[in-house]
Image (cartoon, coloured by chain):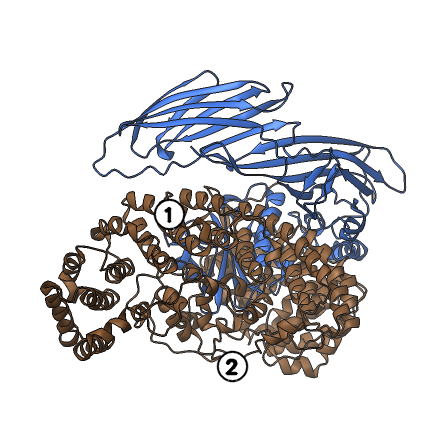
Amino acid sequence: MSGPGQDAKFFTRGKIQEFRAELQAAETKDKKFVKRKTVLKKIVANITMGNDMSPLFTDVVQCLGTPLLEIKKMVYLFLVYYGRAKADQIHLVIPSFLQDCNDRNPLIRALAIRTMSYIPIPVVIDSLTEQLRHHLKDRDPYVRKTAAICVAKLYVADPRKAERGGFVEMLRDLMVDSNATVVANAVAALSEIGDRQDGVIFKLNLTVANKLITALGESSEWGQIYILDSLMRYVPETNADAELMGERVVQQLQHANSAVVLTTIKLLLYLMNYMESRKLIDYICKKMGPPLVTLLSSGPEVQYVALRNILLIIQRRPAVLKNDVKVFFCKYNDPIYVKLAKLEIMYRLASEDNVKEVLAELEEYASEVDIDFVRKAVRSIGRLAIKVEGTADACISSLLGLIETKVTYVVQEAIIVIKDIFRRYPGKYEGIIPTLCENLDALDEPEAKASMVWIIGQFADRIDNADELMDDLTYNFLEEPAEVQLALVTAAVKLFIYKSTSESVKTLVHKILKWTTEDIDNPDLRDRGFMYWRLLAVNPAVAGEIVLAEKPAITTDSDRMDRGALDQLLLHTGTLGSIYHKNPETFIRGAAGKALVDTPALNGHSRQVLVPLQRERPPTGPVVVAGPGPIEPGAASKPPPPLPAESGNLLDGDGEEESVHEDDETEEDSGLQKGAVAAGAADPYASLDNAFGGYIADGPQPLGSAHREDEDLLF
Amino acid sequence: MISAFFIFNQKGEVLISRLYRPDVRRSISDVFRIQVISSSDVRSPIITLGSTSFFHVRINNLYLVAVTKNNANAALVFEFCYRVISICKSYFGKVDEESVKNNFVLIYELIDEINDFGYPQNSEIDTLKTYITTESIVSSQIAAEESSKITTQATGATSWRRGDVKYKKNEAFVDVVETVNLSMSAKGTVLRADVDGHIQMRAYLSGTPECKFGLNDKLVIDKSERGAIDAVELDDCRFHQCVRLNEFDSTRTISFVPPDGEFELMTYRATTNVKLPLRVIATVNEIGTTQVSYVLVVKTNFGNKLSATNVVLRIPTPLNTTSVDCKVQNGKAKYVPEENVVVWKVPRVQGGQELSFTATAHLTSTTHRQVWARPPIDVDFQVLMFTSSGLIVRFLKVFEKSNYHSIKWVRYLTKASGSYQIRF
């Protein structure tokens, strides 16, 4: 090895004419081809910087005559860049390609077909197809493994030609090749073809699946991933088949490559749907926990992937990590995306046994610097009170402590969750209402303000000065966001029902209802205003029964995702879909959906909740959306901004027949849901966002349809 | 699969740009520049716009970016980025803007070899170095037989090792390096303490040596099974791809044919009976609104024949600190205003010794008084010949058909860097 390179000097913008002149000069006197090498390096540097070097096509191609491998590789790189654009001149290089295709040296043969297949224009493809047939049967495995990927490239360029040429069948033959690397690449190519909407279907039977597992031991780490991934295409017909396969792949969990580990977990979770032996399932679950935790010692990016997946896995298989909440405690210097993901897992793993430690941690986080993180920590404290009854007292006193800090976003977040705690434990904590009332002035976010208004209205009978407070709050009624206006209308009516004798209350209600019905354009508000007005006019006693009816208890049952949907989502473990907790076909154009296949081996419960594969896919043509321009930085992970009123939100609280958890969550999710619906009408999970107890609202999201536009410009 | 791979500098200039699939164009790099590099608030290593996803990893002010258009295997994409970094390190030392620019042609050659159509291919450094070099190779002169050897190795069952390695002196070095992570509450209770262990090996062994490796571990599958008293409980271990996982699974023996030179044989994790080399007892009081007083005692927790070196404590101060008076008996303490910490460095502490630190921070009075978040005290250190987990290498046996004698060396090191944290 010679010393480190000294090529930085070539990173300067140059002119086409200069390079051409230098190349021509090098043709006559060029000892050891140093000059040509130098010019080519300059050209490659300019390509990198985004300068169009395509006019040099004929000049660069001339260099192929030199015997230096380094020069050949640079020319080939040039061809990969500009070959497509220079279809009229590409015939100049075909002879040279063909010569290399038949070189004695396997590395050169492989290089030639690899480069040719990167230039998907008919002239090149035609000459490649003739060659490729031989290379797929080359005696050198390196050439065969390269040829296997070439078939995938060929298929993208011209699917019908690849099929007619019998290349798919040749790939199938390579699946039982003697060399594991060849097998892995063949499987990768077949999987890619099988995932296409117009592709040849790729399924595995038991015999081939078993051969693939045998090849696993000799494969490179990447090869193992392709093979493990392809085993998802095998559908076990009997419990025993699934169990045997599970036992054979479980050892891969010990691999150093995190992608091997996660892909193995994906396969095991899939196979477990077809297993019967409780003992084996428990054993596998136990085996999966430690490797998942170990992923948290990887780089932060892999940690993030692992955490998002863990969040899904523990919902389906709680046994995997049930005693491990401590490893998810945040380190002070964790990147913010890791911290947010850990927080969700901590909440989910919290139980009577560990809740003390979890609460202490959350309190610690509530004093950190990052606003998102602090908010989420505060919200988690409140949700913990709802989830684990025994800790409610401690959570309330912790929230009161946080309110005392007077940090506005902390106070607001605390009030939002306290509202839910009141609902969960009626008659237990209302004593703290005066403390909350002291912070009225700090509330400037609609959600927090609406929550506070709800509290005042609901407990107006216990707040002596409720009418004064309401009077203050309605001071800017017409300028308030709709969410707050709705809350105010309802609260005013409740106040009236409690204190119908008070003159000032009468005036207040009258004033608000008049505003609502006469000065406001929002139909939701107006309708609600009319409804209350008539209700009160016709029969105030019945109105009281309706407005202050008993509310269904609030629970955290809705936290768990629907089992069938979860089964389906776990088929995408480790992939982008698992990061966003969305099925890929709902946000990636052309992505293949997956569903469990029903066979006699499928366990009863999985069958019952089976979600069949949706056939509809997002539009494949260009989507024209009059969308906003650049995306807001960070929009992907910010909690949604305080949302405009979701109608019905407060009505729920007033005892309508709506289920409570919806009330609990729509307020956080409505904006996202709207986005999700717009993103893919075919999304069967659009409503599933709710399943995460409001957490998903802060979770990472792909930026949806509104941005398709810029994408299509790029495409 | 990966559609494109880029390396950007901090200004957003493209240093490497390679498109692997026809579904993206080079201009996609502009989107990343606008969305991530120019953005002040990036909160995820993955950004998805429409169907296009950008995965990025940062190193020394560089961004390594992989672009995908499908439902990519996210772990694979990041592992690939990490691998590019480690290959570059091995080829030309550090990975920064200068070295990338200096070796861009080599990098293009490498990323063409280790990724085909977005599918990562063999990326074993030892093998790559046999045919991708910085020397000029005349293509016609490479003997076809020589190439066949290379290709067999690159696709073979032991793709990490050449068959023809020869050493005069056969040696193997084993380094057990443990990073201990601690999070301790203000009351002195251990919130979490665990050990990330790495066993690094440098093998200079001739031929195709068959190695067997033994530890005093008792891999704990079920916490209820109690191991022998001297055995260490490892929560999990992961191995280099040379280790035969099926043998480990059935008989718990670690057997392998090592790559030539340096590699990471295994990583493990331990959470039970973690020995904490340093105890820090901190008393921090806010006196009124103008002063904060610190009293720290650091106790070593290992035999007096050993010592901790490069001990660095980073003690946070409030944001409105103007000056800090420090008193230390050992080492040097200095207030670093840019980072709002006092850095206390002690070059060496023997086992059984105690260090103390007292200081007073003076604060400016602010009209808007915000509560001080009190970030934890962070401690970095190294202790040679000590393992926090108690792990010991029991044996390393080398079998080779020529039956040569080999010398083995084992070293232990426990360290903390950035994750040994004490709250106060």
Q: Which residue is mark 1?
A: A370
Would you call the spot at circle 1 few (<14 residues within 10 Å), some (14-19), or many (20 or more)?
few
Would you call the spot at circle 2 few (<14 residues within 10 Å), some (14-19), or many (20 or more)?
few
Residue closer to the observer: A575 or A191 = A575
Q: Where's residue A33, x and y in %?
A: 62, 53
Q: Where's residue A350, x and y in %?
A: 50, 51
Left or right of residue A594: residue A284: right
Q: Where's residue A219, x and y in %?
A: 74, 58
Amino acid type indicated by mark 1: Asp
Left or right of residue A378: residue B125: right
- The furthest residue to the right: B402
Colour displayed for chain B in the image of the structure: blue
Q: Where's residue A369, x and y in %?
A: 36, 44
**Chain where mark 1 sits:** A
Q: Which mark is residue A124?
A: none
Residue closer to the observer: A602 or A683 = A602
Q: Are marks 1 and 2 in contact (CB under 8 Å)?
A: no
**Residue B60 seen in the figure:** no
Amino acid type indicated by mark 2: Glu
Left or right of residue A246: residue B301: left
Colour displayed for chain A in the image of the structure: brown
**Residue A306 seen in the figure:** yes
Q: Which residue is mark 2?
A: A616
